[in-house]
Amino acid sequence: MNAQELIDTAKKLVTGDKGLLAMDESNPTCNKRFAKVGIPQTEEMRRAYRELIITTPGLNESISGAILSDETIRQHKKGGTPFVKAITDTGIIPGIKVDAGTKDMAGHPGEKITEGLDGLGERLTEYGQMGARFAKWRAVIVIDDGLVPSRGCIEANAQALARYAALCQEAGIVPVVEPEILMDGDHTLERCFQVTEEVLHTVFDQLYRQRVMLEGMLLKPNMVLPGLACLKQETVNEVADATVICLLRAVPAAVPGITFLSGGQSAELASARLNAMNGGLKSRLPWALSFSFARAIQQPALEIWQGEESHVLAAQQALYHRAKCNRAARRGEYSAAMEKT
Ligand code: 5MM
C-alpha cells in the first residue's frame, strides 16, 4: 500500500467543488429504473445509457469521480473505446462498486447484511489493473421502530465495511464507506439522528480495529432525514443542522471528505440540503461536504432519454444541469433560481 497515493486520491475526489457521480446500479436495480420509464432491460440499453452519461459534454466540470458497476467497467463506447479510458481522458477518476448486494440477515427478520468479502482481494487487484482508483461498498440499515435496527445487524455490517476498507487500502484503492440508513418508514428525524449516530460510531470503531487509514478513505452516509412517510417533514435548514451536528459527533476530522448519497430525496431537495450545509455551517466543518448521488443526478436525464437516440442531447443537458447544481451546492451557491435556467 502506498499511503501517500491513497491520501492524494481521496483528497482529489473531494477538493474544490466537484463531487462523485454514482452510476454503479447493479443490473437488477438499473433494470427496475428502466422498467419504470419503459426502457427495454437489455445489456445493450444499459451500455448505451452509460455511454450517454460519460460522454455528456462538460460533465468533468462538476464530477471528480464516477462509480461504475462490474458490468460497466468492462464496457466500451460504440466506437470501441473502453469506458474507463473515456472517463479517465476527461480527468474523471474511475471507481468501482465491489459489494455483492444485500441479503436477508439470518436470525434478524427485516434486516439486511451486505455480502461480497469472499475473493475481494483478488477482485480489487483486477479492478486496479483495469484503472479503478477508488471503490464503494454499501451497507443498508432499516428503521422499523420497536423492531430494528438491532445491534447484531449494525455490528455485522460495520465490520464488513471495515474489512472491505482495509482490503481496498492494501490494494492501493481508496475505499468509500457507505452505511445507508434507509428513508423508508414513518420514523422521525430525531430517530434517524439517533440511528445514524450509533451506526457511524460503530463503523468508525470497526475501521479503527481493522487499521484503516482514515486520511485515505471517504465516508458516504445518508443525510439525517425524517422517514418518507413521517407527517413532520423538517425544513432544509433543520435537516442541514441535524446532519452536521450528527456528523460532527461521529466522524473523525482525519477523514478528508463526506460524500452524501441522495437515498430517494428529490433532486432539488438533495441540492438544497447540501447547499445549506455548505453555506451557513461551513466554518464548523473539518471535512469537505460533497455528493455521491445516483438518482438525484441521473433521474431527470433517464426520464428524458427513454431509450431514444433522438433524446440523448436533451438527456445530457439535464444531467449536466444536475451536476452543476450540486457543484454550486458544494460552494453554498445553489438556489431555486438555478432550476429555472
Ligand atoms: C444508496 O444508493 C447509492 C446512492 O444512490 P442514490 O443517490 O440514488 O441514493 C448508489 O450508489 C447505490 O449504492 C448504487 O446505485 C448501487 O445500488 P445496488 O442496490 O444496485 O447495488
Image (tube, grey):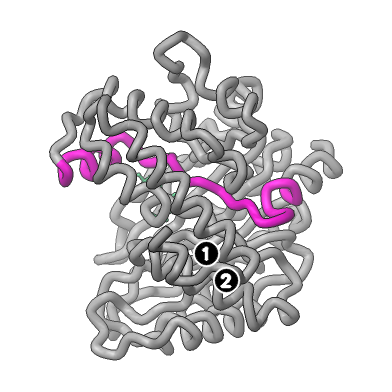
Give the residue type at disc 1.
Answer: Pro
147 left or right of 9? left
Image quadrant of residue 93?
top right
Q: Extreme left residue here?
A: 38
* Viewport quadrant of the C terminus: bottom left
Residue 268 screen position, x and y as percent: 39, 66
Image quadrant of residue 167?
top right
Disc 2 vs disc 1: which is toward the camera? 1
Look at the numbered disc 2 and say if its residue's Cβ is closer than 8 Å to ligand 1.
no
The part of the chain drawn in magenta is 10-37
Q: Residue at x 74, y 43 (%)?
A: 9
Q: Are dots 2 and 1 in contact, CB under 8 Å?
A: yes
Give the residue type at disc 2.
Answer: Leu
Circle number at residue 200: 2
Q: Secondary structure at mark 2?
A: helix
Residue assigned mark 1: 221
Q: Nearer the viewer, residue 27 or 19?
A: 19
Q: Secondary structure at mark 1?
A: loop
200 left or right of 223? right
Mark 2 → mark 1, Cα distance in angstroms: 9 Å
